[in-house]
Image (cartoon, helix red, strand yellow):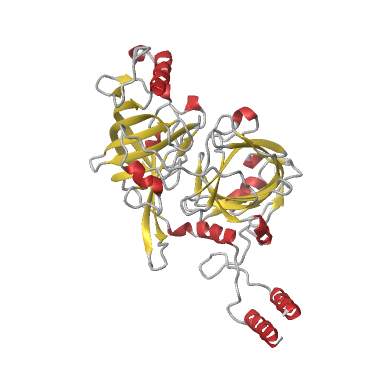
Amino acid sequence: MVRSWWLAGLLVACAAAEPPLRWEPRCRQQLRHLQDGARIAARLPPRLEGRWVSTGCEVRPGPEFLTRSYLFYANRLFKAYQFYYWDPSCRDPSYSLVIKGKLRLRQASWITRGATEADYHLHKVGIVFHSQKAMREVAAWINQTSGEGCSGFLPPGRTWAPGALYELLSAKTERDCTAALGFAMHELSLVRVEKHYQPLLQPQQSGSRLVEELYLGDIHTEWVERLHYRPTGYQRPMQSAVHHVHPCPACGIIYRADEHHPPILPVRAQLPMQLSGSWVSTHCEVRPAVLFLTRYFIFHGSNHTWEGYYYHYSDPLCKQPTFTIYASGHYTQGIPSSKVRGGTELAFKVTQAQVTPMDQVTVMMLNSSEPGSCGLTGSWSAGVEQDITPTNGCLALGIKLPHTEYELFKTEQDAKDRSLLYIGERPTDGSSPDSPDKRPTSYQAPLIQCAGASEEFSNYLSLKYLGKKDANGNEALKPLPVAFLLFIALLFLRWG
């Protein structure tokens, strides 16, 4: 009993002391880490020299499963490998592309802040087939859809020759048979390199390790548009073969690969879909049409309801907030996707939403919106949340309520055994996947699980940029209330 009284006294003393005790759940810590820029540096213009590799199996719209390995030389030439697979684990190769050309960096992008625009010219594109089936299918695509110069690319019944390299594109002969594959290198027209430092994991070591990431332009979600689309967002970043995250089992395998020896990635356990809990962005995300945002989701598996926070910003480091959207609703039981192996199909109903404008530009836009189309007309002010459910959404922000979205989800574990959630990629044209035929076939950047289902009590803490500011202009953590500390002390007295 003496020990309990001593503990109660200590808690009360700490509550009155300066500075106050502070406590912050992991989800909020991650969001703050992102809002603080996570010590990321981006050089303009970027330095590309060296080799960059995928960190795992990538999924492009279609779906297409691939890994990439790009080598940039100091004289602006480049040699890129794209390895394509039949499966979402990138263990069953289909064919490999060898792409050679020249890249010239231009000016900083006027559209996508933080990016550099570039021009590229392709010299050669070659293809190596890894099975008779792959050779037969690709030859059929080219012979059926290409022009006269490609109609006899591979005669029907041609026997597969392991290791043989066939020319798809040549600048010298002006032959281009790549369109049938939906191939384009427009990703090279938008470039960004980020640097940050990864803390060393070993207990006996201190310090950090440099990590460099290469962001290239996104791929249009509509197959027919990808040959003409000029990117305004990014796809999954590649990492420097020298300065990459650790551990990265795939990095070394992809680095050592070539067109004759495609990378076979390690076997990964298939995880059942477990949505319950809280998930948060791993970095500042960029979507087409120049949207910078971070996401935070809470899934309640017991009643299949969900909550989502979408924090929008005007800068590529997610430091300058523009507005926040809070949405909620319910979702259906998932079923395995018949189109995207390894994915799960769900339907999400969005029934309620609130918006919090965070800068004067957004406030002015919302206050000038058509009456009855977005909350109370003329009543918007910075930092104040308003419910847009009564007006069936917000026309100015493209939000319609209620509405249903047909989604694609996937969960997996990273090399550190952390749970990741992949949600379907949004349509490039800015529309909503509001019908089954518009269901995504690829994924956005992954979310990381920051709290399990048993930790959902932490979600009562506000996540809406409404805290006080510290001396540096950042949101200060709120102290734990004295009443709460006294309550804990009384519990110890009761059971001590």
Quadrant of the rendered image containing residue 371: top right
The quadrant the C terminus occupies is: bottom right
Residue drawn at (51%, 39%) of the image: 289
Q: Is residue 170 above or below residue 319?
A: above
Q: Residue 38: x and y, percent?
A: 46, 58
Number of numbered labels in the structure image: 0
Residue drawn at (58%, 68%) of the image: 476
- The residue lying furthest to the left in this view is 75
Q: Looking at the image, which is closer to me, 62 or 433?
A: 62
Q: Looking at the image, which is closer to me, 488 or 109?
A: 488
> Can see residue 379?
no
The quadrant the N terminus occupies is: bottom right
Q: Residue 189: x and y, percent?
A: 38, 36
Q: Residue 56: x and y, percent?
A: 43, 43
Q: Looking at the image, which is closer to me, 422 or 87?
A: 87
Residue 369 placement, left or right of 447: right
Q: Residue 30: x and y, percent?
A: 54, 58
Q: Is residue 248 above or below residue 90?
A: below
> Can see residue 15?
yes
Residue drawn at (70%, 43%) of the image: 374
Residue 197 placement, left or right of 365: left
Q: Is residue 148 above or below residue 482?
A: above
